[in-house]
Image: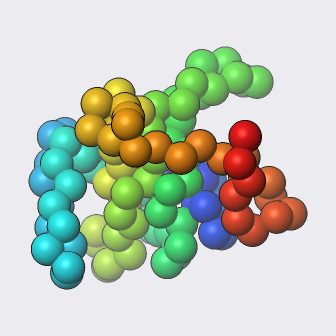
Amino acid sequence: MCAVGAESWQTICGEITRTNVAMKFGDGTVLKGLDRVETGKNSFIQGDSGGPVYIKTTDTTAKAVGHISIGLGEPGKNGFYYMTLKKVFEDFGDELELGIINKNFHGSRDL
């Protein structure tokens, strides 16, 4: 399981250690159904949320499985939580705004 930070463009891989976790943010928002990936010594930076989470299927292909929801950069707790694409479409399908991300363009563009 790997992910790419939306801001840093850093690729970090790890192992799923927990599934179906609920996380509460400081503003009271609760996200349910997240999966946790442990990443060892590597961690994402602020702004990396929203980056793609994927599984390599061959040396040259990968399958998108979700997006980074929360990065963790604490000693001994490096990792991230992600929301699966299935969960995104179930929970937010009617509210999604799709865009194209370009490494040289820091933002999104309408399709």
- In front of the other: 34 or 110: 110
Q: Is residue 17 above or below residue 85?
A: below
- Give the farthest residue toward the top: 58
Give the number of marks: 0
| Residue 109 point in image, percent of width and height | 74, 53
**Position above or below: 59 against 99:** above
Write down the quadrant of residue 80 in the picture.
bottom left
Q: For this rendering, which residue is in front, 28 or 47?
A: 28
Q: Farthest front residue?
A: 94
Q: Is 36 in front, or is 98?
A: 98
Residue at left offset 53%, top offset 73%: 47
Q: Is residue 1 visible?
A: no
Query: Looking at the figure, which quarter contains the C terminus?
Result: top right
Residue 75 in the image: state x and y as whole percent.
32, 79
Residue at left 13%, top 53%? 22
Work out whether residue 96 can be spotted: yes
Rendered image quadrant of residue 56 = top right
Looking at the picture, does residue 10 appear above or below residue 61? below
